[in-house]
Image (tube, grey):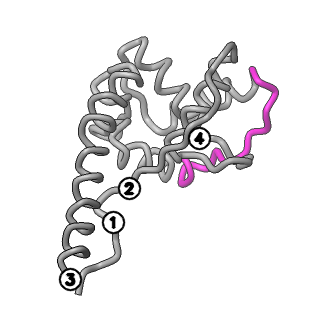
Amino acid sequence: MARDIPLNEIILRRYERPYSASKRELVRKICLSLGLLQPGDSRDVIVDILLALENARKERKEISSFEIIERIKEIRKQHSLEEKGLAESNIRRQLKRLRDLMLVDKKNNLYRLSEFEPLSEIFANKIENFLIPQTVGRVKEYLALFEKE
């Protein structure tokens, strides 16, 4: 019997065209677009994790989960947001989600955006050109088998 546990999973959402927005709001839309956030979700610490990792990428620095938490505190303070969702267990869970989507690498308990690439390149290389075609191909295999019977 086949297991119902997906090998990988991707959710894509299409929103209105981006115009002008703060960097945090743009990252929030990226997270919504990639299914990392649900529409209307107020628990959006994953946005700040990506912002912290993007800032570290510009410095070409790998950072620990503890340093991510410190950077998130600064980001949330700048945007007058509450410090919710900053438990280390939650940060690690969110980092795992980002790793599963191949956006983030982990080595020696240090994290970075995949190979220090910009998010646009990571999306193009890992999601658009790798994950989506594989997923679509597998769906087509199921459809072909379904139509044979």
Q: Amino acid at mark 1?
A: Pro
The residue at which mark 3 appears reads as: 149
Mark 3 vs mark 1, foreground winner is: 3
C-alpha distance separating marks 3 and 1: 24 Å
Mark 1, Cα crowd under 10 Å, few <14 / some 14-19 / many 20+, is few
Residue 55: percent from left, percent from top: 50, 18
Residue 8 vs residue 94, the one in the foreground:
8
C-alpha distance separating marks 2 and 3: 27 Å
Q: Are marks 3 and 4 in contact (CB under 8 Å)?
A: no
In this rendering, position of residue 66 left or right of residue 43: left
The residue at which mark 2 appears reads as: 9
Which comes before the other along the chain, label 3 or label 4? 4
Which comes before the other along the chain, label 2 or label 3? 2
Which comes before the other along the chain, label 3 or label 1? 1
In this rendering, position of residue 48 left or right of residue 5: right
Q: Which residues are magenta?
A: 78-91
The residue at which mark 1 appears reads as: 6
Q: Amino acid at mark 2?
A: Glu
Numbered marks: total: 4
- Please tell me which residue is depicted at 25% across the width and 68% down the height of the picture: 142
C-alpha distance separating marks 1 and 4: 21 Å
The residue at which mark 4 appears reads as: 32
Q: Secondary structure at mark 2?
A: loop
